Image (spheres, grey):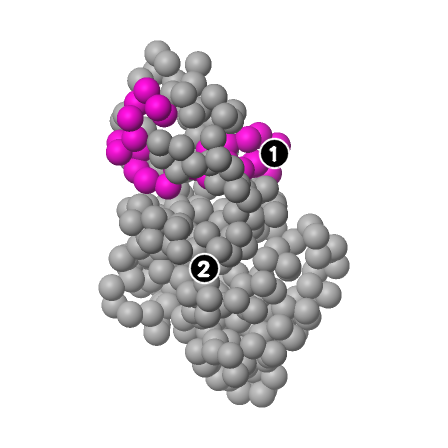
Amino acid sequence: MKKEKLSIEHKELLYEKMRSIDTQLSEYSFANLYLFRKAHDYELLFGEELFIRGKTYDGHTYLMPTVSLDMIDSGYLRTIMEQADFLFPIPEEWLKIFDGKDFSMSSKPGDMDYVYTVAKMSSYPGRNLHKKRNLFKQFISGYSHDARPLTKDFLDDAMFVLDEWHTESGIDAEDTDYYPCLEALKLYEELILCGGIYYADSEPAGFILGEELNEETFVLHFAKARKKFKGIYQYMYNQFAKILPPKYRYLNFEQDLDKAPLRIAKSSYLPDAMLKKVRVRLK
């Protein structure tokens, strides 16, 4: 079986394959695969079907399909599954092809994607989101503010924000997504990413970077901001949701990786869906 480490040269092979898979799971994107290739040690396995082999954050090897599982011969699927501990991340809607006699299925809360409606993020409606509305209002009343598309003209400002965010975090860069985010900024055109950059009192305050995941869903790969500007995240999410084309109904904020600060922050926006990423093992 031919194997290759995932690289930027695989974009032509994988970009459309990932786009053709109708799922809201954030991993099914070439940009996501490429930017986190080191964290997951991704490699391509070429055979009757193309699979991506990686490692989970808790140390297991997995196979990720590049087409819907119902398009893969069941005999070949069983054979290829011997190359890893399990299939992952498998959307719940694909599980109907597996029987409980030969396969076992499990999922971890830290892997689940947080999904919100664009309508919610563009208005923060209701009593339960009043704190978000208040922070948003404090930001727009407390600072002069501006929102712009994140183009090459503003990359230096975005990198400044990223460096400030990293310094304020007090965490080693290797233990954060600093390097994937830096690479995303440098390759945003090549990876077909887009986003926004936000200013407060004429200073770079934050940025968002993501891409279309499917016809209805936009995924946010990165959202970074400076702590000195209270309400900046609420402002960024709100403004970005307001400028998205009407076809997008959902925003995917990705998983929390079992990290308490991420879980608290993402849960506070009251997700409309939590998407399980299932691990399917051959018994």
Q: Residue at x 32, y 20 (%)?
A: 75
| Nearest to N terminus: mark 1 or mark 2 | 1
Question: Which span of residues is magenta-colored?
Answer: 51-77
Q: Amino acid at mark 1?
A: Asp
Q: Residue at x 47, y 30 (%)?
A: 1
Observer able to see residue 267:
no
Q: Residue at x 48, y 40 (%)?
A: 44
Which residue is labeled 2 in the image? 220
Check disc 2: other Cα within 10 Å, few if <14, some if 14-19, many if 20+: many
Name above or below for residue 51 compared with residue 22. above
Using residue 4 as the reference point, say whether residue 27 is left or right of it.
left
Q: Amino acid at mark 2?
A: Leu
Q: Residue at x 53, y 87 (%)?
A: 144
Task: Indicate the secondary structure of the residue bearing disc 2.
Answer: strand
Pick whichever, 229 or 95, lies toward us.
95
Which residue is labeled 1 in the image? 58
* Residue at the extreme top: 101
Give the alpha-carbon distance from disc 1 to disc 2, as whole Å: 23 Å
User: Residue 196: x, y in percent?
Assistant: 46, 74
Pick whichever, 201 or 147, lies toward us.
147
User: Residue 221: x, y in percent?
Assistant: 49, 58
User: Residue 71: x, y in percent?
Assistant: 26, 34
Name above or below for residue 5 compared with residue 214. above
Q: Is there a contact, CB below 8 Å, between mark 1 and mark 2?
A: no
Observer able to see residue 151:
yes
